[in-house]
Amino acid sequence: MQVKFERTGQRRYAVAVLRSEHGDLRMGPAPGYSDLIPHDLVHMVVEEEFGLRDAIFGQLAAGGNAGTFVPTEELRTKAWARHVERRNRSTGTEMGRSETLAAQVYPRWLRHSGHLPDSNYVRQDLPPTDLSDTDLARVFERLDALSGQWRAVDVGGSMTVQWPWPERA
């Protein structure tokens, strides 16, 4: 599964999910815009780095829609909605952990990168974490690399990231 992060306007982005087992999806506009890195890309990084195969992107890989993505190739019929709802109910068991990790990692990464958290998006004080310095350093390195790619994307452009685990039927 490929995940495309599209810069759709000034301070706007969308996420396209290109799947081989299930139809493609899109969410646009997506929440949590940042010039540094999209919010959903932070989720993708923490899910991959901490082995969360059944969080947001794992649910997408299993045929769900994470409650926010819509199909790009097929009609949103009642049958489609029933199918996706069954997938959503049987997957996504680690979504809460993904939210927790993103909330712990993102403000720490901002400070690590020399940026102050935006009070409209993240708390000024750091939330507690049980993540080790080694874990954080590994995630920061990945976020640094992806942030550099994102900052090079102009309006109308995109960057694509590969989900590391196979889709599930």
Image: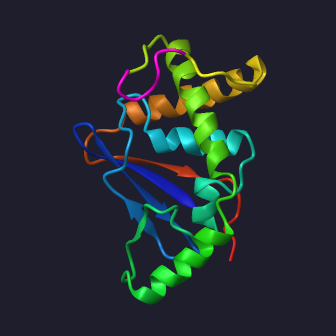
List x then y, in percent, for residue 14: 35, 52
Asked if residue 144 shows in the view, the reply is: yes
User: Closer to the camera, 145 or 35?
Assistant: 35
Quarter of the image where the N terminus is located = bottom right
Rendered residue at 39%/39% (across/down): 32
Q: Is residue 120 magenta?
A: yes
Q: Quadrant of residue 47?
A: top right
Residue 22 appearing in the image: no
Specify whether 77 is left or right of 17.
Answer: left
Name the image colouring. Answer: rainbow
Q: What secondary structure predominates along the stretch shown in magenta?
A: loop
Position of 53 relative to 153 (above/below): below
Question: Which stretch appears magenta?
Answer: 119-125
- Which residue, as the protein is rendered here, is positioned at the far left? 10
Compared to residue 106, the image places residue 82 above or below, namely: below
| Camera-nearest residue between 124 and 72 | 124
Residue 70, position as x, y percentages in the image: 40, 69
Q: Is residue 24 magenta?
A: no
Quadrant housing the C terminus: bottom right
- On the image, which quarter does residue 105 sit in? top right
